[in-house]
Image: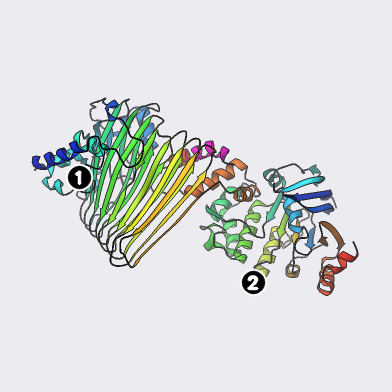
């Protein structure tokens, strides 16, 4: 399978703090990769750097997406190339309704019927007129993020902790939406891919992930089957990672 | 029967005493500069106006075909050029110049200079001594015209002092919507607009009032407004300023006299170039169970200076509830915004008054959030700014909305 994303010796800092310390990572089209790791290890930093948020400064290394060096492209350009992100805690934008944003990002001209059907499926009909994330619960935020991505249709979706703040009932809904977004609910979509950060691993019950990684102290370690990695973490915590560095 | 000469004499005497009285706020204007007087004839329809005048009128929300309007009033410089009432609304309301109303009704004594003090400052004095019309709109008891009345007060020549006195009466149980646009047909015109507005909302009446101001770099504006609201009455005011102005100072007052009356001010100010803008709203809660809300959204661009004032004054012995929400965004290093909220309770033991005020830059994390959805930086700033201003006003045509977006787009580039 053809390579979709690659990072080479990626060093990233936030302000004065060095967070990523030489990350080598690659994934192919159609894969779902999962990132595990303790708090502060650099998982979100890796994701935000891939998306191109300016606060995450690349000190060294390269990022290639679909064969193109995107290390110095801005957020907008990366989104146009086919990267998308679901935030763990998206900002509130009062005055800009979810409906308005969906209208703006619907550049592919998806039909009203299609939009109405996914809005209903994600149980967001009553949120469309509200300001973005204004007073949304954890689950509502995740569903709103996934709705936006389903309209945006990125080739590679970065999903930061899809289960955080979501009750058990809604995790299934979020899982279904991720599968639908990636085209996994139908005939397998060979192109759409995802990187998912998870602490609890609940999402693995709903999403069929291909590979797992542990991010530890700014580096990528322990590549393997995501379920095996999760079961190791459950048994031994992240101590083993420190030992096998 | 016209208003009595004795009453007019009394007004004149008071006005003369305030001829040189400076206003509490805003730069002092030398009125002697503005002496140009132009007499204009009536027109048959708004469509027959010159292209320049039409364009200026359209940008203040005026519908030239008078579609979805119950009536129209237009004044250019000192002359009333057009008054009309849609035939299907005859018997529901009346529209004429205030001058005509003073000649027609002796009971105008109960309204003319009864809300705004004639001796408030030199500007009220100037209007009293040299009044050049203004609109009079009265909606009869229990009438609720479906569409708004539109009025346009336009200045077309240099060195004009347009001294209008507007009176609106909403009789018991009636409802009225008014869109009023004040504008210039020449972008470089130098002059002053003085507008006295006295609105009376009777028991159970409702007035929905929208004012759009489109002035220019060399123009001064001094409106003086008071609204008196009786029991169960309500007043909703939308004010929009999106073009540069040399200076504007106004502090309209809604006086909630009657029990269960309410007032709401929505103010949108976009400070451009070196505009000096001092605007606010004051709500006096005198009746029991009264409600007030004042929302101001302010953007300071270029070298503008903006004072955004808001006063809530509780005087009732009963319950009242009022809130001020005053927020500003600074787009330029040279712009200044002063947010000045004031809450006053005059022994009003059951009053609940609150305010929130904030001034800051446009939030980068919001811009980045939208950019991550494939929206360019300029467009993201524009969308957030439009949302912040939240210009969702009924009966405002699309091209006005488009014009607003263009202003935002042109200035928002400097925001980050």
Task: Magenta stretch: give its range.
Answer: B405-416
Name the one closer to the observer, B170 or A187.
Answer: B170
Number of marks present in the image shown: 2
In the displayed structure, would residue B94 be above or below residue B217?
Answer: below
Q: Is residue B112 above or below residue B194?
A: below
Chain of the residue displaying label 2: A
Left or right placement of residue B300 versus residue B235 in this view: right
Within the magenta stretch, is there residue B349?
Answer: no
Magenta stretch encompasses residue B406? yes
Can residue B326 be seen from the camera position used here?
yes
Asked if disc 1 and disc 2 are in contact, CB closer than 8 Å, the reply is no
Q: Determine crowd level at label 1: few under 14, some 14-19, many 20+ residues with C-alpha closer than 10 A.
A: some
Q: Which residue is mark 2?
A: A167
Quadrant where the image shows the C terminus of chain B: top right
**Where's residue B289, x and y in %?**
31, 65
Q: CA distance from mark 1 to mark 2?
A: 63 Å
From the image, which quarter does the N terminus of chain B lie in? top left
Residue at left 15%, top 38%?
A: B12
Q: Quadrant of residue B377?
A: top right
Instruction: Say above or below: B166 vs B158.
Output: below
Q: Is residue A40 above or below residue B403?
A: below
Q: Is residue B82 left or right of residue B275?
A: left
Quarter of the figure with residue A212: bottom right
Q: Main secondary structure of the magenta part?
A: helix
Q: Nearer the viewer, mark 1 or mark 2?
A: 1
Residue in view at x 24 percent, y 54 percent:
B143
Q: Which residue is mark 1?
A: B113
What crowding class fits label 2: few (fewer than 14 Cα within 10 Å), some (14-19), or many (20 or more)?
few
């Amino acid at each position: 399978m053809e390579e979709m994303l690659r990072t080479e010796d990626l060093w990233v800092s936030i302000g004065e703090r060095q967070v990523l310390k030489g990350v080598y990572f690659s994934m192919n089209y159609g894969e779902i990769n999962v990132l595990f790791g303790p708090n502060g290890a650099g998982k979100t930093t890796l994701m935000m750097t891939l998306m191109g948020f300016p606060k995450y400064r690349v000190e060294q290394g390269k990022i290639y997406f679909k064969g193109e060096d995107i290390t110095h492209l801005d957020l907008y350009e990366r989104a146009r190339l086919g990267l998308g992100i679901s935030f763990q805690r998206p900002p509130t934008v009062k005055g800009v309704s979810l409906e308005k944003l969906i209208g703006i990002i619907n550049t592919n001209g998806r039909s009203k019927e299609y939009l109405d059907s996914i809005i209903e499926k994600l149980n967001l009909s009553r949120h469309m007129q509200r300001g973005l994330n204004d007073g949304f619960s954890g689950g509502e935020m995740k569903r709103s993020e996934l709705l936006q991505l389903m309209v945006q249709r990125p080739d590679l979706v970065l999903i930061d902790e899809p289960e955080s703040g979501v009750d058990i009932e809604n995790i299934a809904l979020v899982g279904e939406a991720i599968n639908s977004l990636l085209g996994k609910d139908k005939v397998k979509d060979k192109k759409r891919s995802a990187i998912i950060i998870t602490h609890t691993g609940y999402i693995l019950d709903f999403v069929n992930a291909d590979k797992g990684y542990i991010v530890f102290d700014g580096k990528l370690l322990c590549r393997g089957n995501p379920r095996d990695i999760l079961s190791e973490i459950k048994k031994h915590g992240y101590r083993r990672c420190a030992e096998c560095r | 029967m016209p208003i009595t000469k004795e009453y007019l004499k009394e007004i004149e005497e008071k006005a003369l005493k305030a001829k040189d009285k400076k206003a509490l706020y805003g730069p002092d204007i030398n009125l002697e500069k503005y002496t140009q007087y132009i007499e204009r004839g009536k027109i048959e329809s708004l469509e027959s106006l010159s292209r320049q005048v039409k364009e200026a009128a359209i940008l203040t929300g005026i519908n030239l075909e008078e579609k979805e309007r119950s009536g129209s009033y237009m004044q250019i410089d000192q002359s009333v050029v057009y008054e009309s009432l849609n035939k299907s609304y005859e018997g529901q309301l009346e529209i004429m110049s205030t001058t005509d109303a003073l000649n027609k009704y002796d009971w105008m004594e109960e309204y003319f200079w009864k809300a705004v003090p004639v001796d408030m400052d030199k500007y009220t004095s100037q209007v009293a001594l040299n009044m050049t019309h203004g609109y009079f709109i009265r909606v009869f008891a229990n009438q609720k015209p479906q569409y708004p009345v539109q009025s346009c007060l336009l200045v077309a020549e240099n060195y004009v002092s347009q001294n209008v006195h507007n009176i609106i009466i909403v009789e018991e149980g009636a409802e009225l919507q008014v869109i009023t646009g004040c504008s210039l047909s020449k972008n470089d015109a130098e002059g002053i607009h003085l507008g006295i507005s006295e609105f009376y909302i009777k028991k159970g009446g409702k007035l929905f009032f929208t004012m759009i101001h489109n002035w220019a770099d060399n123009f001064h504006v001094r409106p003086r407004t008071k609204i008196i609201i009786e029991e169960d009455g309500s007043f909703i005011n939308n004010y929009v300023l999106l073009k540069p102005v040399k200076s504007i100072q106004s502090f309209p007052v809604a006086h909630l006299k009657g029990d269960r009356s309410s007032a709401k001010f929505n103010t949108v100010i976009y400070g451009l170039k070196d505009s000096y803008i001092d605007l606010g709203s004051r709500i006096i809660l005198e009746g029991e169970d009264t409600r007030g809300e004042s929302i101001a959204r302010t953007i300071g661009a270029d070298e503008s200076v903006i004072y955004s004032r808001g006063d809530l004054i509780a005087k009732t012995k009963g319950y009242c509830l009022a809130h001020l929400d005053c927020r500003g965004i600074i787009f330029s290093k040279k712009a200044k915004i002063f947010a000045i909220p004031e809450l006053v309770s005059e022994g009003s033991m059951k009053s609940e008054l609150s305010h929130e005020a904030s001034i800051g830059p446009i939030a980068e994390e919001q811009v980045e959030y939208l950019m991550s959805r494939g929206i360019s930086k300029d467009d993201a700033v524009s969308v957030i700014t439009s949302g912040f201003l939240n210009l969702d006003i009924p009966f405002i045509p699309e091209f006005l909305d488009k014009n607003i977006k263009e202003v935002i787009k042109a200035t928002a580039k400097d925001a980050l």
